[in-house]
Image: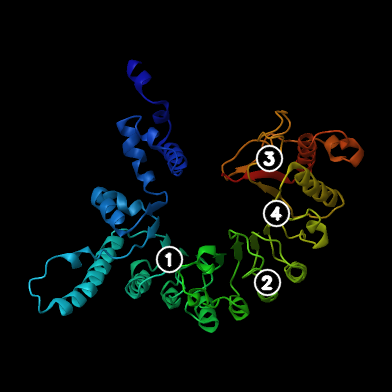
Amino acid sequence: MANLDQTPPILALPLELRELIYKEVLSNPSQGPQLLQSCHEIYAEGNKFLFQRPILFRGQIALYHWLDQVPETHLHHVTEITLELQNVDMRPLLSPIASTASTSSTSKLLTWELHELELDRLDQALRRLQNIKTFTIRALPERQSFLYREFLAKVLESLGSLYPNLSSLSLQGNLHHQSLSFLSSLQELSSLSFDGFSSSSPVETASILSNLTHLTNLSLVCQHTLLTPTTHMHSSFTSKRQSLTTPVFLAMRQLASLSLNETMHPATTTSLFFTPEVLTPLRDHTSLNSLSIRLSHAPNTETLEAFEDFLEHALAIHRLELDWPGLEPEVLETYALLSETVRDVWMRCEGLEMAFDVLYLIMESREAGGLKGLERVVLMRGAWSEVVGGIVGGTEDEDDDVNEEHEGVEDKDEGDEGSEGDTDLDDDSTLGETDEINVARVKRSLNALGVQVSWCTESA
């Protein structure tokens, strides 16, 4: 009995259940190590799960040092990494040179040698990580030397031989001078994220992306620092044309998910990709079932009209995310966003009053027999300290769980069961009541109608 008392209760569970717990706890970079410090057996069983979460390397040197310290037996657990590619260390050029007469030729040769040695060293390091499925490459965001661009190009070209089964690739930083031709060697690629600019022409881009038959998820994330001229950038730096135009979207018939993230700061007044030229070729894509639009500015009238036309023809959309300043609840009615095919709706709410308006419109439509396929509504918000009486969370009403804080994750609202009597909610019944209570009631009503309502609160 004494030995049993000293044994952590978790070890009484079957190994399969313990591993599920390890994976759940250790998958979050902000937590977990304390669990491994419980005892030697837990450390031995759960240590591998530390290597299954995303790992960030701030430069090649950080990668080399990490590989020198990690046991080889753990490396096959690593499946997702982010690598910031830094300039090659040129300090060896400052070492004394024996022959003054050959200084010039030796320096030039050594410069290229350093890059070739670095490429070889990086190649050997990445080959030790054989099971990478998700790879993020961060290039230098500022102006780049010719040598760095060549170095970056060779790293990209090596991806096909390093990870032929790579499924997800994200390109960040300044890759505007790089060709997308290297993607042709990644035939298993299913997800691609970049800012839409490269040295490849739209015709070349259309050919490359359309031939990647598994590429179904495309995310375009605008990088305002690369599009805004500064004192250290020549004007030609920002004159690169977009690689993704109408012919590209027409060619990508396999596209199932499209995300347009143009949340640039300071906010711009025009869109690069949320435009009629992009929306028009997408409306006949029968495979497109998920669309996410996040803007730092309100779309113009022409774009909203094109968006309305798109939604009237796009009959396969299951998930829709809308997020831009001034987004009004009436958009749900005006543009008929919620067809019978839509299952998930994500929408930005700037306050509880707007949240109530959104949910009430949905409830009215559902009670009238519409929105038959709708299963979930997710209301996105930031911190509401300035919206709800200076206190994030507002009321402590036990029926209103909209005020719980979540660091960028969903609140499943499992406590709202609802009842038949909650479905009748007219304007008179809400007069004089707080926004918190109104939202809580309409949430319960939607739950009773089979629609789950959740919050997604973004961390500061």
Q: Is residue 307 above or below residue 16?
A: below
Name the amino acid, label 2: Thr
Q: Is residue 268 left or right of residue 160?
A: right
Reading the image, the residue beneath label 4 is 345
Observer-nearest of 304 and 1: 304
According to the picture, the residue beneath numbered tag 2 turns out to be 275
Residue shown at 23%/73% (left/top)? 111
Which residue is rendered at x = 66% and y = 43% of the image?
455
Point out the tag, 1 or 3, that comes first from the N-terminus.
1
Task: Estimate the spatial distance between the alpha carbons at disc 2 and disc 4, rounded to whole Å.
Answer: 21 Å
Helix, strand or loop status at disc 1:
loop
Sequence order check: which comes first, mark 2 or mark 3?
Answer: 2
The label number, if any, that marks residue 163 in the structure image: none
The part of the image, by quadrant, that contains residue 335 is bottom right
Q: Are marks 2 and 1 in contact (CB under 8 Å)?
A: no
Mark closest to the chain's N terminus, 2 or 1: 1
Q: Nearer the viewer, residue 391 or 155?
A: 391
Q: Nearer the viewer, residue 250 or 370?
A: 250
Whichever of callouts 2 and 4 sits on the residue coming sooner in the sequence is: 2
Q: Which label lies toward us, 2 or 4? A: 2
Tell me the CA gap for discs 3 and 4. Answer: 25 Å
Rendering coords of residue 120 (x, y %): 25, 68
Check disc 2: other Cα within 10 Å, few if <14, some if 14-19, many if 20+: some
Q: Secondary structure at mark 4?
A: strand
Sequence order check: which comes first, mark 3 or mark 4? Answer: 4
Give coordinates of residue 362: x percent, y percent: 80, 50
Residue 409 in the image: x percent, y percent? 58, 44
Residue kind at label 3, given as amino acid type: Glu
Task: Please name which of the two marks, 2 or 3, marks the residue nearer to the observer.
Answer: 3
- What label does residue 142 carry, if any? 1
Query: In the picture shown, does residue 371 fall above or below 309?
Result: above
Say if mark 2 contacts mark 3, CB within 8 Å. Answer: no
